[in-house]
């Protein structure tokens, strides 16, 4: 029985899946299995996974055609995972070689149900990363999640299988921000999810991905807010301000047009000027970059903010 089961939802990922799987084979902790759940790819994704499995028996291919990433993750955990610790990884993201070693040590504490670390945001290769996520010092809470999700990406989350099952897994009806709604239920059901300041995950910012549709992300957040209310938690003006600051920064990273970042910055300021500007360095930088993005040519925007 491996210590970790790594769940990788895949769909037409031929451009990146080989790099993702290679980052797993470079883990200096060997006790893992990786289940690649294909959602009906029509490119070379399946062939690349099968080639990796021939080289390393820890890789396995499963199919969950046409059901989406949430259903793929649920199937991976419920139907295929053999380990007690579930690590998620998307088919275009990368891991640091020491990630599983660090996680194995942290999970020696039986009171811990989930762990996430720092994320580096890159476009082509990790060395071009210009931004890193901010990792808070306290355990994950619903209140924090209603502002800005510090986990950032499912590729950055590892949970005990028992905690995943207890909260019901992913809501397959939600396509955008499904991770936020899941995390709220996970924490709301009593899971203790802790941060580590270590850089463990590289997140690929690709223009056109699901998480670049900011309006759809807002719709998903509304569903997450409904879930939070079931646990007696409602967003404050500061939460709304912080969330729109996050959307402004994301708009800058994925080049969502000249005025998109500024629009979210102004909405955030309208909700709570103090909340948007705290910490001041982040508020000022986001607002200044959003204003600058309205007048800069596209190539320069991509160079500065991606």
Image (cartoon, rainbow, N blue to C red):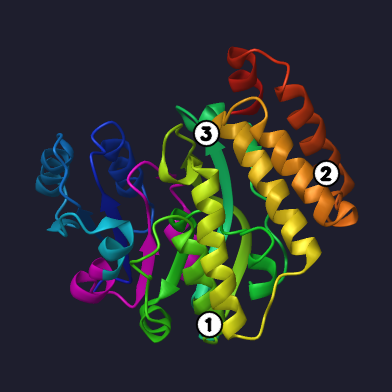
- Is the C-beta separation of discs 2 and 3 under 8 Å? no
Q: Is residue 119 visible?
A: yes
Return the residue nearer the eye: 191 or 11. 11
Q: Look at 83% across and 51% down and name the residue there.
A: 270
Quarter holding the N terminus?
bottom left
Return the residue nearer the eye: 44 or 234. 234
Of labels 2 and 3, earlier in sequence is 3
> In which image quadrant can residue 302 be found?
top right
> Label 3: which residue?
122
On the image, the x and y values in percent for residue 208 come to 42, 34
> Label 2: which residue?
283
- Residue range corresponding to the magenta coloring: 75-104
Left or right: 253 in relation to 78: right
* Label 1: few (<14), some (14–19) or many (≥20) C-alpha neighbours in 10 Å: many
Q: Nearer the viewer, mark 2 or mark 3?
A: 2
Residue 247 belongs to magenta span: no
Q: Secondary structure at mark 1?
A: loop
On the image, the x and y values in percent for residue 194 come to 60, 71
Q: Look at 49% across and 42% down and name the residue there.
A: 213
Q: Secondary structure at mark 3?
A: strand
């Amino acid at each position: 029985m491996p210590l970790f089961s790594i769940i990788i939802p895949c769909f037409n990922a031929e451009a990146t899946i080989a790099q993702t799987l290679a980052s797993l084979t470079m883990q200096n902790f060997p006790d893992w299995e990786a289940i690649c759940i294909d959602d009906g790819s029509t490119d070379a994704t399946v062939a690349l996974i099968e080639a990796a499995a021939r080289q390393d028996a820890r890789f396995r291919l499963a199919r969950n055609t046409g059901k989406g990433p949430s259903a793929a993750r649920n199937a991976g955990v419920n139907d295929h995972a053999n380990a007690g610790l579930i690590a998620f990884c998307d088919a275009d993201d990368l891991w640091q070689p020491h990630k599983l070693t660090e996680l194995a040590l942290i999970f020696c504490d039986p009171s811990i149900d989930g762990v996430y670390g720092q994320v580096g945001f890159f476009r082509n290769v990790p060395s071009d990363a210009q931004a890193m996520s901010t990792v808070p010092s306290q355990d994950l809470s619903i209140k924090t999640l209603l502002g800005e999700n510090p986990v950032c990406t499912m590729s950055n989350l590892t949970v005990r299988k028992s905690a995943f099952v207890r909260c019901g897994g992913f809501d397959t009806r939600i396509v955008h921000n499904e991770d936020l709604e899941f995390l709220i239920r996970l924490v709301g059901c009593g899971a203790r999810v802790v941060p580590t300041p270590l850089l463990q995950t590289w997140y690929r910012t690709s223009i056109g991905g699901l998480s670049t549709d900011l309006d759809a992300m807002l719709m998903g957040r509304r569903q997450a807010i409904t879930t939070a209310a079931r646990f007696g938690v409602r967003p404050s003006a500061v939460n709304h301000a912080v969330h729109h600051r996050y959307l402004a920064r994301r708009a800058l990273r994925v080049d969502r047009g000249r005025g998109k970042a500024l629009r979210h910055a102004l909405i955030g300021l309208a909700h709570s000027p103090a909340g948007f500007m705290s910490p001041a360095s982040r508020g000022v930088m986001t607002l200044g970059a959003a204003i600058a993005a309205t007048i800069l040519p596209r190539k320069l925007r991509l160079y500065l903010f991606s």
